[in-house]
């Protein structure tokens, strides 16, 4: 009898795990909605704590239509459960106050260190679509993005300026996150080189910070032509468009960050 009950308990636990994974996407979508609605920014601008009504009244800048507070409450309940925000219930019976956590501080749009652009990029329908092609890739081989959109990601970005901007903004924010570590960890090595090429450097944010901290370095930002065409000008940095599989510019040192996994 005990064995049967144990087997049933184990089976139910297995079922619970499947349900958890089945709805795992809900966390990403709730997080994406929080970024789109700028909930973290609203709480931050309100002194670090805000009620649902305060958040709701700011979402549409006080205009119409009025936000659905019940829907907002459900999203916040999930994000509090996931420790993205916290909620405080005042002892005087006032409305609950929502606060930022160390996690939600990374969702602030105007912060120097933010992952908001990356989160919007990774959860955009255009980048979610390839995930639905995994089984097709197993059966037929090939690249998931190409199966979803008919071409590889770089060709798609080249032909779609809006997606190109979304992608570049997402990658740029990750560069800001690692810049401080690179400047500290490679300080001695950077002092010994006269030129540095960042292969797959996007719009040049990382190489520009390195050159800013090490003015003796000639910085070269190297990426595909449609990427560098949108790059801003930086002192000491030149942008060169090309294909790394054909050739890369000459320099004393080469830097590569987060792009090999995109290449087949």
Image (cartoon, rainbow, N blue to C red):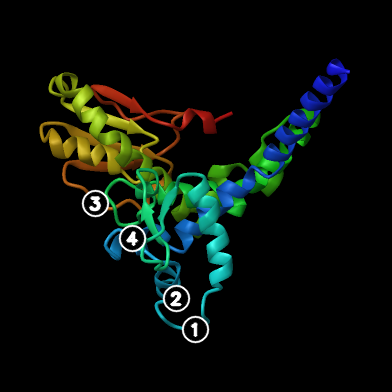
C-alpha distance separating marks 2 and 3: 35 Å
Dot 4 alpha-carbon crowd within 10 angstroms: few under 14, some 14 to 19, many 20 or more: many
- Answer whether labels 2 and 1 touch (C-beta < 8 Å): yes
The residues bearing labels 3 and 4 have C-alpha atoms spaced at a distance of 39 Å
Query: For the N terminus, which image quadrant?
Result: top right
Say few, some or many: other residues with alpha carbon within 10 Å of mark 2 (under 14 / 14 to 19 / 20 or more). few
Tag 1 residue? 64
Q: Residue at x 53, y 63 (%)?
A: 73
The residue that disc 4 covers is: 49
Query: Sequence order check: which comes first, mark 2 or mark 4?
Result: 4
Residue identifier under label 2: 60
Helix, strand or loop at mark 3: loop
Which residue is disc 3 drawn over?
Answer: 233
- Does the rendering let one see residue 158? no
| Residue 22 location (% of width, % of height) | 72, 41
Q: Which residue in the rendered view is the most extreme toward the bottom? A: 64
Dot 4 falls on a residue whose secondary structure is strand
Q: Nearer the viewer, mark 2 or mark 3?
A: 2
Say which label, 2 or 3, has the lower sequence index. Answer: 2
């Amino acid at each position: 009898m005990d064995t049967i009950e144990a087997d049933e308990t184990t089976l139910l636990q297995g079922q619970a795990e499947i349900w958890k994974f089945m709805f795992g996407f809900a966390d990403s979508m709730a997080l994406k909605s929080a970024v789109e609605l700028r909930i973290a920014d609203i709480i931050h601008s309100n002194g670090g704590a805000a009620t649902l009504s305060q958040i709701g009244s700011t979402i549409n800048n006080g205009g119409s239509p009025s936000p659905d507070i019940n829907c907002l409450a459900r999203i916040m309940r999930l994000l509090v459960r996931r420790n993205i925000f916290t909620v405080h219930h005042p002892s005087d019976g006032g409305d609950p106050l929502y606060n930022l956590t160390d996690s939600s501080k990374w969702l602030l749009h105007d912060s120097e260190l933010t992952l908001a652009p990356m989160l919007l990029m990774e959860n955009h329908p255009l980048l979610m679509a390839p995930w639905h092609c995994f089984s097709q890739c197993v059966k037929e081989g090939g690249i998931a993005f190409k199966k979803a959109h008919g071409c590889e990601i770089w060709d798609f970005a080249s032909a779609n300026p809006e997606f190109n901007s979304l992608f570049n903004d997402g990658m740029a924010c990750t560069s800001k996150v690692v810049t401080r570590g690179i400047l500290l960890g490679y300080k001695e090595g950077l002092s010994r080189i006269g030129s540095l090429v960042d292969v797959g450097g996007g719009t040049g944010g990382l190489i520009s910070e390195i050159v800013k901290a090490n003015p003796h370095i000639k910085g070269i930002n190297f990426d595909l032509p449609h990427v560098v065409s949108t790059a801003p000008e930086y002192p000491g940095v030149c942008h060169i468009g090309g294909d790394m599989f054909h050739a890369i510019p000459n320099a004393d040192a080469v830097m590569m960050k987060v792009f090999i996994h995109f290449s087949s």
